[in-house]
């Protein structure tokens, strides 16, 4: 890797008055080191930029130094509380006295149960004295306390290390970026990243490149996560278990994920030499079997270590879960019936180069339609049983409550309060199994709403959202919280088994994955090749657009390897359109990123295809082919996402001159709400737009400034032949009564851009899926089996398209597998002049 080093050594310049009088340092050849400003040189040439950028990102997302350090300090105290309180409950409480099975210690008047008097037992009576309590601690308890002390001491050292590290990050934010901690919540990550790039030009944090792009920063923050996302996408991880009665299930917990990352990324025996460089042996084909054997041994030893530490980890999991969730379950028993995105689902649905807050924003938007979709599927048998159980338990609960209201002394009867609590929990659980008879949901519409925000669903689920098979596989992505808690509790027992008997068998595949899907990027280091979002190398034909120009580099053929004496080909394409959708997402969240020619051709082709679909096929009206027009089908699907999206569709489908439009989404809501401006605002004139109050912007996706150059929505309006401002708002550019958020120059304000970015993401996702589906329906017969079913080996694509029936489609697919240059130059999305397009026109 070539590097251009820039130093601060300069020849000192002579003073004008000294010329000709004595020899100057410049003439004598003496070099004097000019010391730069301390603040400017402080972050020059940072060796480990991966860790530095990752800490910088977490510092921004976790609200600054005080919040982060307070949280870590309280976690240390929380750990001490759990250990001390658990020991106290097990050894320092006399439960015989607490439950009145024995009288309290000491001679207390009125404590004898034989004289008919009842002494009210206090908590102090049931507590064993400290000295006696410590004397009764057994050897096993002391072992657990000793292990806890060692673990706490290691955590304490880690907190001190974080204190030093994040103090440095605080200085970087305050000094170099000119950002105070109080301003963090008012700045988006895009704004922080922009300032970091400016500091790079001044201070050269990375000496290998003059300028750092947005993709370079994402690569360094998400280097290992991109590898994990790619491994999940290629079905290398996680492990699928066939459990009797339950069937095939995906098992991935936090404990198992921690062990996988320890083995593959940051552990002392991991394939990485440091945070940014893969060991050279993993890039050599002749070393693959030796490395596989070594990795297999390491996995075995880690599995044995997990087995030895299993009792301690299991006890901690039980105690932590009990203290953390017991009060919540008591207060809201129905919370166990709610759902959450599983760890596997978060990896499956994650884009390449997607930060945590961007992923959370997408999944939060998809949560409600996903919950409604899963609520559709109710078991009639369970509903009948739940209704009868709820009737009986409800009757008992009602009687106990009435008796308590009549006479509060009823609560003093043994186990009455316990019975009321248990009966209430049973009623709440039964209600979760009883469907609401007044609600009617459309499975396909809800699944489309999930897809608009989650962005990834298998092809085989299309048109089959009503089936129990799709529901069961979707539940692996969107699971019950009760199932999540159960898996975490069982994780210490299951993790050693999975490491030793499942992941260990894939050691050779893991080694091959690193060799085939690792590229070196100047100024960044070794990264997962999928993270480059190269649609030519890792894209799929049925997901791509035409118009790839001569700038496209020649495709390298897939790597071939031998395993067990048999040759096999590793498919180089990412599955389910991961490369294409990741590229579209990254361009929307980072609109200033300068794309490579191939990526730019793809995005531009997508915009042009949308413009062609706006005007309709062969120049005709698109309404005549509404059922076959992919853009209008996507807009129709978006209209079901909410009021704002419906206004967007009304604007896109309506005429550009037909009165005021309701785009952006909230424009119609503001107009219908009436004039809510204050007298002071009205006195400022009709064009006055109040400055937005920005709170919580650290979690916002993308920039807060207008970035209409890559907007698919603007492509639609431009294709209608009207100016952007007029087509979007139904107003003239010079109109004095512009809608809020639109400046007289036609630029969107910061309160508008986030909504447009989200709408663009949803529309782009549905549009790409629609184009892919129509391309598949023309020449490919894809499998109707829902994604995630068994029988698929490593490296084989799930929901793989079967052999195409059309000769051209067959040539496309074979060209990808064999690396034929002819297929690389073939248009991947059929244009209006192609034979398939003519066939489609005849069919229409």
Image (cartoon, rainbow, N blue to C red):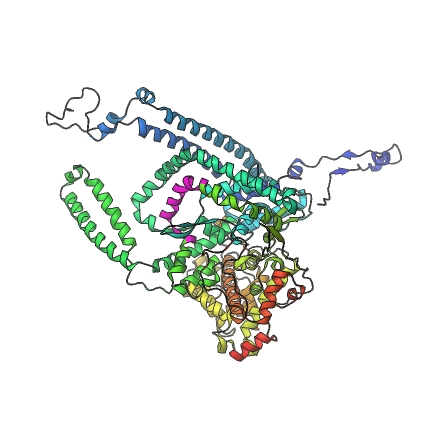
Q: Is residue 599 above or below residue 695?
A: below
Classify the position of the N terminus by image quarter: top right
Q: Is residue 586 above or below residue 136?
A: below
Which residue is nearer to you in this view: 48 or 72? 48
User: Residue 96 placed where, x, y %?
Assistant: 22, 28
Do we see residue 524 in this rendering?
no
Left or right of 302? Residue 334 is left
Left or right of 245? Residue 155 is right
Which residue is nearer to you in this view: 336 or 141? 141
Q: In this view, does 245 lie above or below 601?
A: above
Which residue is nearer to you in this view: 66 or 320? 320
- Main SS type for the magenta part? helix
Question: Which residue corresponds to the image point at 32% horizontal and 58% vertical from the top-left?
Answer: 378
Q: How many numbered tags mark residues here?
A: 0
Question: Which residue corresponds to the image point at 82% horizontal and 36% vertical from the top-left?
Answer: 15
User: Residue 528 placed where, x, y %?
Assistant: 60, 49
Residue sitting farthest toward the right: 20
User: Residue 629 placed where, x, y %?
Assistant: 51, 72
Which residue is nearer to you in this view: 77 or 329? 329
* Residue 479 shown in magenta: yes
Specify the quadrant of the image occupied by residue 668. bottom left
Do we see residue 456 in this rendering?
yes
Left or right of 640? Residue 196 is right
* Residue 298 shown in magenta: no
Task: Tell me which segment is drawn in magenta.
Answer: 476-496
């Amino acid at each position: 890797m070539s590097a251009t080093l820039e130093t601060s050594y300069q020849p000192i310049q002579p003073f004008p008055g000294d010329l000709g009088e004595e020899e100057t340092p410049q003439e004598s050849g003496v070099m004097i080191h000019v010391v730069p400003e301390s603040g400017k040189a402080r972050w020059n040439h940072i060796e480990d930029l991966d860790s530095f950028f990752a800490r910088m990102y977490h510092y921004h997302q976790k609200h600054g130094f005080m919040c982060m350090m307070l949280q870590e300090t309280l976690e240390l105290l929380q750990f001490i509380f759990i250990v001390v309180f658990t020991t106290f409950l097990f050894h320092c409480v006399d439960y015989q006295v607490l439950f009145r099975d024995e009288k309290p210690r000491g001679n207390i008047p009125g404590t004898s149960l034989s004289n008919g008097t009842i002494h009210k037992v206090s908590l102090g009576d049931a507590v064993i004295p400290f000295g006696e309590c410590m004397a009764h601690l057994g050897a096993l308890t002391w072992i657990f306390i000793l292990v806890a002390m060692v673990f706490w001491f290691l955590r304490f050292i880690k907190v001190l290390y974080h204190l030093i590290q994040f103090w440095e990050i605080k200085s970087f934010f305050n000094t170099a970026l000119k950002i105070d901690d109080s301003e963090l919540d008012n700045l988006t990550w895009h704004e922080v990243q922009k300032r970091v790039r400016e500091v790079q030009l001044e201070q050269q944090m990375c000496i290998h490149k003059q300028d750092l792009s947005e993709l370079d920063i994402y690569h360094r923050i998400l280097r290992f996560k991109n590898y994990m996302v790619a491994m999940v996408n290629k079905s290398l991880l996680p492990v699928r278990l066939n459990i009797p009665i339950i069937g095939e299930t995906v098992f991935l917990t936090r404990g198992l994920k921690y062990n996988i990352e320890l083995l593959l990324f940051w552990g002392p025996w991991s394939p990485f030499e440091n945070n940014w460089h893969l060991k050279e042996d993993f890039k050599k084909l002749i070393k693959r079997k030796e490395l596989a054997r070594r990795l297999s041994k390491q996995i075995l030893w880690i599995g044995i270590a997990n087995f030895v530490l299993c009792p301690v980890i299991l006890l901690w999991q039980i105690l932590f879960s009990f203290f953390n969730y017991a009060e919540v379950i008591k207060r809201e028993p129905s919370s166990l019936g709610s759902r959450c995105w599983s760890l596997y689902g978060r990896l499956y649905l994650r884009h390449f180069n997607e930060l945590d807050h961007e992923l959370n924003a997408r999944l939060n938007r998809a949560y409600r339609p996903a919950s409604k979709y899963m609520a559709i599927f109710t078991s009639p048998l369970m509903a009948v049983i739940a209704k009868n159980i709820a009737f009986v338990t409800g009757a008992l609960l009602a009687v106990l409550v009435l008796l308590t209201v009549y006479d509060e002394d009823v609560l003093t009867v043994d186990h009455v309060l316990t019975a009321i609590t248990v009966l209430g929990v049973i009623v709440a659980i039964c209600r979760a199994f009883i469907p609401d008879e007044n609600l009617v949901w459309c499975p396909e519409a809800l699944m489309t709403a999930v897809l608009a925000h989650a962005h990834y669903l298998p092809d085989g689920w299309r048109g089959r959202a009503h089936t129990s098979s799709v529901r069961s596989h979707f539940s692996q992505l969107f699971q019950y919280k009760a199932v999540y808690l159960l898996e975490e509790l069982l994780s210490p027992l299951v993790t050693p088994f999975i490491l030793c008997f499942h992941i260990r068998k894939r050691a050779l595949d893991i080694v091959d994955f690193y060799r085939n899907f690792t590229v070196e990027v100047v100024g960044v280091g070794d990264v997962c090749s999928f993270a480059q979002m190269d649609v030519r190398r890792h894209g799929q034909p049925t997901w791509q657009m035409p118009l790839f120009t001569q700038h496209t580099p020649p495709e390298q053929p897939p790597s071939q390897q031998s395993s067990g004496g048999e040759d096999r080909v590793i498919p180089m394409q990412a599955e389910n359109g991961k490369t294409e959708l990741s590229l579209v997402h990254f361009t929307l969240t980072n609109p200033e990123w300068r794309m490579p020619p191939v990526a730019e051709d793809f995005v531009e082709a997508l915009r042009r295809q949308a413009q062609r679909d706006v005007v309709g096929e062969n120049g005709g009206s698109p309404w005549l082919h509404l059922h076959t027009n992919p853009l209008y089908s996507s807009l129709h699907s978006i209209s079901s996402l909410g009021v704002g999206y419906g206004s967007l569709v009304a604007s896109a489908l309506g005429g550009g001159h037909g009165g005021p439009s309701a785009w952006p989404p909230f424009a119609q809501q503001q107009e219908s709400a009436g004039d809510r401006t204050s007298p002071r605002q009205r006195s400022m004139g009709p064009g006055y737009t109040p400055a937005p109050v920005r709170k919580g912007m650290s979690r916002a996706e993308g920039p807060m400034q207008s970035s209409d150059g890559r907007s698919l929505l603007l492509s639609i309006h431009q294709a209608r032949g009207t100016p952007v401002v007029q087509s979007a708002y139904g107003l003239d550019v010079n109109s004095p009564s512009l809608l809020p958020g639109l400046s007289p120059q036609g630029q969107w304000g910061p309160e508008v851009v986030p909504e447009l970015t989200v709408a663009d993401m949803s529309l782009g996702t549905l549009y790409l899926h629609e184009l892919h589906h129509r391309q598949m329906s023309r020449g490919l017969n894809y499998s109707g089996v829902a994604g995630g079913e068994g029988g698929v080996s490593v490296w084989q694509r799930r929901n793989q398209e079967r052999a195409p029936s059309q000769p051209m489609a067959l040539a496309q697919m074979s060209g990808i597998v064999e690396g034929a240059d002819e297929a690389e130059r073939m248009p991947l999305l059929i244009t209006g002049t192609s034979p398939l397009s003519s066939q489609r026109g005849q069919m229409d």
